[in-house]
Image: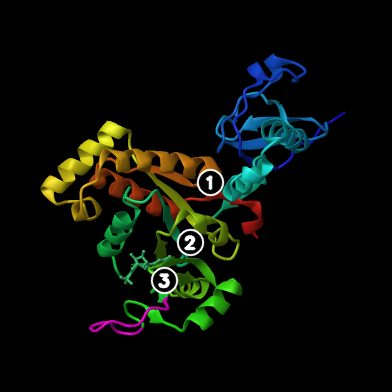
Amino acid sequence: GAQRESKVRVRAHFDYNPDVDPYIPCKEAGLAFQRGDVLHIVAQDDAYWWQARKEHERSARAGLIPSRALQERRILHDRTQKNGTDLDSKQNDDFDREQIATYEEVAKLYPRPGVFRPVVLIGAPGVGRNELRRRLIARDPEKFRSPVPYTTRPMRTGEVAGREYIFVAREKMEADIEAGKFVEHGEYKGQLYGTSAESVKSIVNAGCVCVLSPHYQAIKTLRTAQLKPFLIHVKPPELDVLKATRTEARAKSTFDEANARSFTDEEFEDMIKSAERIDFLYGHFFDVELVNGELVNAFEQLVQNVQRLENEPVWAPSMWVQ
Ligand code: 5GP
């Protein structure tokens, strides 16, 4: 019968290659895709096989892809095969990923004049997300702003309440964390530190771009329809480039973070491993992946992406687009 094309777009949270799928009814009819690709779902009539087209290949024919239900069954099946004996040893954050690893419905989120989505820089420690944030703010401090964090530690001489930190009692901060009022928090030397959702919102309401560079765990609390963050993964380049650029930057004093101290080979390798882990857990959530080799180039790319965000629609979870 006559089929009407659906308007459904999804972002794939897994890679798919029909050539190695033993269950696809016809390999030639399959559509290969990669995690992060936006797919236009043309037909969802069959319980197991959807028909889809890649969003950026408008003229290509539609192909078969596993339906959400089929992919969920496969993940469950793989999980029991792999972890039948050691479910308890699974790390908690692996579970975060496996809960959502099929498709996410997306729609175009159009920029609104004077309303800027928070820009969130995520990355392994040492790769340079804080440095990029500082540079963005230094470039235009009226426009780019980071919230003043909260802390439970005592104020030091020379500090001003509300400037370096908002100083609060531990009981108050614990209660507010419990109530979900913090988009991120952490403990350092026995004291609590954190950023409140309210401070992010007040920067957005003031017509500024809120720039954050939290621990990657914060993605879970930040990624809401209310905050609509634009997520950037600041990744290390390959090992030899990583070492070379940091060594050179230290010699020239152009890179604050590398400047502070030199990294060991093991620390460089850890940065790459950590970045891979962030990609494994949260790769499908990032709007942009930005490789920080030469800092000036990475910063230029950051600026371009922020400008693009102000001028062009960007795919976002359809729940955010009303
Ligand atoms: P200090 O107490 O010397 O000002 O800061 C010490 C450490 O507190 C920082 O290096 C950082 O690890 C942590 N910190 C500062 N601000 C924040 C924040 O907003 N959130 C989190 N999670 N940690 C912070």
* Image position of 61 (left or right of 202): right
Q: Main secondary structure of the magenta part?
A: loop
Label 3's element?
loop
**Residue at the spot 30% in from the left edge and 45% down from the top edge:** 298
Q: Disc 1 marks which residue? A: 282
Label ID, residue 190:
3
**Residue at the spot 66% in from the left edge and 36% down from the top edge:** 40
Q: Which amino acid type corresponds to the residue marked 3 in the rendered image?
A: Gly
Q: In the rendered view, would you say 27 is above or below 86?
A: above
- Mark 3 and mark 1 residues within 8 Å of each other at the beta carbon: no
Label 1's element?
helix
Give residue 138's quadrant in the image.
bottom left
- Give the image's coloring scheme: rainbow
Label ID, residue 117:
2
Question: Bounds of the magenta span?
Answer: 151-161
Disc 2: CA contacts within 10 A as few (<14), some (14-19) or many (>=20): many
Mark positioned earlier in the residue sequence (3 or 1):
3
Label 2's element?
loop
Residue 321 in view of the camera: no
Pick the front one: 85 or 3: 85
